[in-house]
Amino acid sequence: MNYHDPDSLYRIFSQVIRLHYQRMHQLLDAVGIYPGQPQMLFALHMANGQSQKDLAAKLNIKPATITVMLKRMEKAGLVERRPDPADQRVSRVYLTKAGQATWHEVTQVLRIIDKECFGNFSAEEQVLLRKMLAQLRTNLSVACAKTGDELDG
């Protein structure tokens, strides 16, 4: 495969990833949040009052990254951290009213990006694309679990 061919799967996939990121950034910027924050809002919307440790595990983000993200979101008034009443060592994270309102705006952003990405796909094409992307995710998950030894030979 020629990776520099503009029609190669690799090149098209890379362009799709970049364009999706740019469009999400545009839409989320209008809401006043950063691209990593919708997942946090969703996790808290589904189960408010989670510990930072649980959020880090659920979102597959390092605890230090969660701390930075939460500080930024606290400063914006989207979340608040409170000590766990049963264990003062544990900090629990809650959506504020502003965070809940922002979650609803983010839901609208997700609807927009979904329509922009998949609006002209038939239902059958969407099912096929979902299946192919799931397989791609599986392939990459397996590759990420490897040690990197395949580059030695």
Image (tube, grey):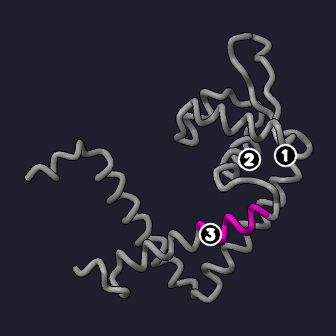
Q: What residue type is labelled 2?
A: Leu
Assign the N terminus to one quadrant of the image.
Answer: bottom left
Extent of the magenta region: 21-29
Between disc 1 and disc 3, whose residue precedes? 3
Neighbours of disc 2 within 10 Å: few (<14), some (14-19), many (20+): many
Q: Name the residue under label 3.
A: 22
Q: Which amino acid does label 1 sit on?
A: Gly
Q: Does the magenta stretch include residue 57?
A: no
In the displayed structure, would residue 82 be above or below residue 114? above
- State the image coordinates of residue 16 (x, y, percent, origin top left): 50, 75
Q: What element carries label 1?
A: helix
In percent of the image, x 54 and y 39: which residue is there? 61
Between disc 2 and disc 3, whose residue precedes? 3
- State the image coordinates of residue 140 (x, y, percent, origin top left): 35, 57
Between disc 2 and disc 1, whose residue precedes? 2
What secondary structure is the stretch in magenta mostly built from?
helix
The answer to whether the residue labelled 1 contacts the one labelled 3, judged by CB atoms less than 8 Å apart, is no
Q: Name the front one of labels 1 and 3.
A: 3
Q: Mark 2 points at which residue?
A: 41
Q: Distance between the residues labelled 2 and 3?
A: 20 Å
Q: Is residue 27 magenta?
A: yes
- State the image coordinates of residue 14 (x, y, percent, origin top left): 43, 72
In the displayed structure, would residue 45 be above or below residue 83? below
Q: What element carries label 3?
A: helix
Q: Name the residue under label 1.
A: 99
Q: What residue type is labelled 3?
A: Gln
Q: Is residue 19 shown left or right of residue 140?
A: right
Q: Name the front one of labels 2 and 3.
A: 3
- Which label was assigned to residue 82? none
Q: Distance between the residues labelled 1 and 3?
A: 23 Å
Q: Is residue 86 shown left or right of residue 12?
A: right
In percent of the image, x 57 and y 42: which residue is there? 59
